Image (spheres, rainbow, N blue to C red):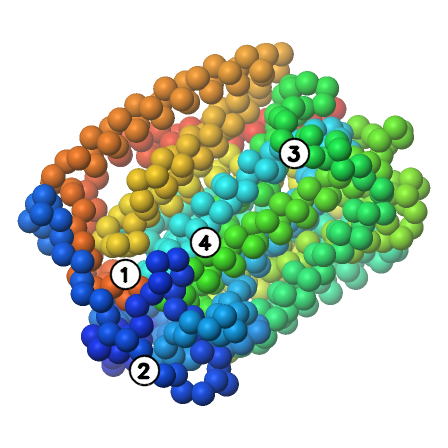
């Protein structure tokens, strides 16, 4: 396979962007990186000299300083060059300016990966899960979405740094830093979960167009052909513009929200006061985990990191991509909350309340209760969510396989130049579409089970993410700050706790979930305090004290993978990883058992 290399060189790819001479680059501001000029802008003025490198602290021990990466490492030559976004271009060697207009031009050119990954996560399964939450529990679960905003932002911000600084996809980093076993295990997890989820996306296509009387034998093949055609054009810009059509179509949920005449009071109350209408039980806890799974999914980590690399975003533009991610996080939560509110207010006091079947049934019920216009809007929202979800999910899988196999994996390449990359994408789309055309599957239960499965598998993905963002060989001065490690550790531990509660309610359906949650929360707090004490002790260890970077932070990129020192694996770390994997296997088995129980009535 072409382009299979561990290091980049001047002989096998086009020249990479290297740091400018010490007298030319513009130093970044403390709050944001210097923005670029517009593609059509005139030549930039000269920039002031770099500030002097910060000397190491007097108390720091003698240690090897961070080595600057003289050129950006890449696994594909097409990952180097101009940023060609849906709304603008940034030349590879353009220097930043500080005018507000040019900063906005830069943001328009860079915006995309964060917004697409977030809106793509409001997919067919998400629409079904949020609709079920509103139809069966009113607005009482809105507080879950509020808690997920910082989870989304923190998880994906770490991904932003990994993508921009390393130039290597998530799967390849896991493979290189944790060994082939863990790399293949993670990609295997991703492949199984993604493929099952892609199937649910085509279920969404079938249900949405079925409302308009279109046979699934017409709707599903047409959707599959459209997704392949959008992706294999050989132009990143054309693909991103197509994705933005889906992003804007997602706004149809706003007029749908107002059609059901929602009340602001209950919505505000349930956003800030946790509770579950009817009380917590095994079924409601499973739904909470499903909401977590459909809002924060493992594929997001793989997709955004690789898409940032494919878009050629470098450390200079990290703050712009962070803003892109923040915008996406709020957009996805607003859309999810609107869907919950639509079902809650539309079906309150009707015979449909508490009787969720699937998203198609919700559309039909809206037709009876609110009217055909509202039902048509809901069906279109479901169709749009299914298409963008299928496109993004499948692409994340192709990116991951490209990382592992070292093959050409860029949307900048034509089909003939990246046959395996586009072939994997097309094969997954076609296989998932064919499965949906086979009759007999309980669609609603499959959708809920897949989303909950994502919630169970997410802790492992988050653990790898956290470890990579503390690997100084990989991120250098871009490693997590101590406060971020604390918050991220709380997030990972909470996800594990949710999975533990799911296991307990599956084995013991009559268990008191409230008491179990309180006990689990107390144990979680004790564990986090112990972890914090250990982390503080490690922080004070002179052997691992932090040294200052030898180059400005905005110019530091990861050296070639072959030059990185191998990470040290302690016995405790190995035991923790093995325990986590064993726990996840048991969790998945019990989750399948629970889904079968729900399907059986």
The residue located at (53%, 18%) in the rendering is 517
Q: Which sits in the foreground, 292 or 445?
A: 292
> Which quadrant would residue 45 be assigned to in this image?
bottom left
Q: Position of residue 62 (x, y in %)?
A: 6, 49
- Is 372 placed left or right of 177 in the picture? right
Residue 271, labelled with which disc?
Answer: 3
Above or below 279: residue 67: below
Ranked by sequence position, the earlier of labels 2 and 4 is 2
Rounded to the nearest whole Å, what is the CA distance between mark 4 and mark 3?
Answer: 30 Å
Q: Position of residue 482 (x, y in %)?
A: 30, 40
- Is 430 placed left or right of 27 in the picture? right
Determine which residue is flagged by label 2.
46
Rounded to the nearest whole Å, what is the CA distance between mark 1 and mark 2?
Answer: 21 Å
User: Decide: marks 1, 2 in contact (CB < 8 A)?
Assistant: no
How crowded is the residue under tag 2: few (<14 C-alpha within 10 Å), some, or many (20+)?
few
Rounded to the nearest whole Å, what is the CA distance between mark 2 and mark 4?
Answer: 38 Å
Q: Nearer the viewer, mark 4 or mark 1?
A: 1
Determine which residue is flagged by label 4.
302
- Is 422 placed left or right of 212 in the picture? left
Ranked by sequence position, the earlier of labels 1 and 2 is 2
Q: Which quadrant, please, contains the N terminus?
A: bottom left
Q: Secondary structure at mark 2?
A: loop
The residue located at (61%, 38%) in the rendering is 145
Q: Is residue 369 visible?
A: yes
The residue located at (75%, 51%) in the rendering is 253
Q: Nearer the viewer, mark 1 or mark 2?
A: 2
Residue 553, labelled with which disc?
Answer: 1
Q: Position of residue 2 (x, y in %)?
A: 36, 73
Above or below 501: residue 254: below
Q: Which quadrant, please, contains the C terminus?
A: top right
């Amino acid at each position: 396979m072409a382009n299979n290399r561990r290091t980049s060189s001047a002989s096998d790819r086009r020249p990479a962007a290297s740091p400018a001479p010490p007298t030319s680059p513009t130093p970044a501001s403390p709050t944001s990186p210097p923005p670029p000029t517009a593609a059509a802008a005139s030549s930039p003025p000269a920039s002031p000299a770099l500030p002097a490198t910060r000397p190491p602290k007097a108390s720091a021990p003698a240690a090897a300083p961070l080595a600057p990466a003289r050129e950006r490492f890449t696994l594909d030559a097409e990952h180097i060059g101009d940023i060609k976004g849906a709304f603008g271009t940034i030349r590879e060697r353009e220097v930043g300016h500080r005018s507000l207009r040019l900063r906005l031009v830069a943001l328009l050119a860079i915006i995309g990966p964060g917004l697409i990954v977030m809106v793509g996560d409001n997919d067919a399964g998400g629409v079904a899960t949020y609709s079920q939450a509103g139809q069966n529990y009113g607005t009482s679960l809105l507080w879950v979405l509020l808690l997920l905003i910082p989870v989304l932002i923190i998880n994906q911000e770490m991904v932003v740094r990994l993508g921009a600084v390393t130039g290597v996809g998530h799967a390849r980093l896991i493979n290189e830093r944790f060994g082939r076993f863990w790399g293949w295990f993670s990609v295997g997890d991703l492949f199984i979960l993604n493929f099952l989820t892609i199937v649910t996306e085509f279920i969404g296509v079938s249900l949405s167009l079925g409302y308009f009387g279109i046979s699934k034998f017409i709707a599903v093949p047409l959707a599959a052909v459209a997704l392949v055609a959008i992706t294999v054009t050989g132009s990143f810009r054309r693909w991103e513009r197509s994705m933005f059509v889906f992003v804007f179509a997602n706004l149809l949920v706003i007029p749908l929200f107002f059609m059901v005449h929602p009340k602001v009071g209950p919505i505000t109350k349930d956003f800030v006061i946790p509770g579950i209408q009817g009380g917590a039980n095994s079924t409601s806890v499973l739904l909470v985990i499903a909401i977590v799974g459909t809002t924060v999914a493992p594929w997001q980590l793989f997709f955004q990191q690789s898409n940032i690399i494919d878009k050629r975003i470098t450390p200079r533009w990290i703050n712009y991509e962070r803003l892109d991610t923040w915008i996406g996080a709020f957009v996805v939560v607003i859309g999810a909350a609107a869907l919950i509110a639509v079902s809650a207010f539309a079906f309150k006091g009707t015979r449909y309340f508490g009787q969720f079947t699937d998203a198609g049934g919700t559309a039909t019920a809206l037709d009876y209760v609110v009217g055909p216009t509202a039902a048509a809007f809901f069906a279109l929202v479901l169709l749009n969510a299914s298409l963008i979800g299928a496109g993004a999910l499948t692409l994340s899988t192709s990116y991951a396989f490209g990382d592992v196999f070292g093959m050409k994996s860029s949307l900048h390449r034509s089909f003939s130049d990246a046959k395996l990359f586009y072939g994997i994408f097309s094969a997954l789309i076609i296989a998932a579409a064919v499965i949906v055309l086979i009759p007999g599957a309980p669609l609603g239960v499959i959708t809920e089970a897949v989303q909950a499965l994502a919630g169970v598998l997410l802790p492992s993905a988050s653990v790898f993410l956290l470890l990579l963002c503390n690997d100084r060989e990989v991120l250098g001065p871009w490693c997590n700050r101590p406060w971020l490690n604390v918050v991220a550790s709380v997030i990972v531990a909470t996800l594990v706790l949710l999975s533990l509660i799911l296991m307990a309610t599956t084995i013991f359906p009559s268990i008191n979930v409230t008491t179990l949650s309180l006990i689990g929360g107390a144990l979680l707090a004790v564990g986090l305090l112990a972890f914090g004490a250990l982390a503080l002790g490690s922080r004070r260890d002179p052997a691992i004290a932090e040294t200052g970077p030898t180059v400005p932070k905005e110019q530091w990129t990861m050296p070639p993978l072959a030059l990185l020192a191998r990470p040290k694996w302690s016995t405790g770390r190995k035991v923790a990883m093995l325990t986590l994997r064993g726990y996840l296997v048991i969790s998945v088995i019990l989750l399948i058992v629970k889904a079968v129980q729900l399907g059986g009535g």
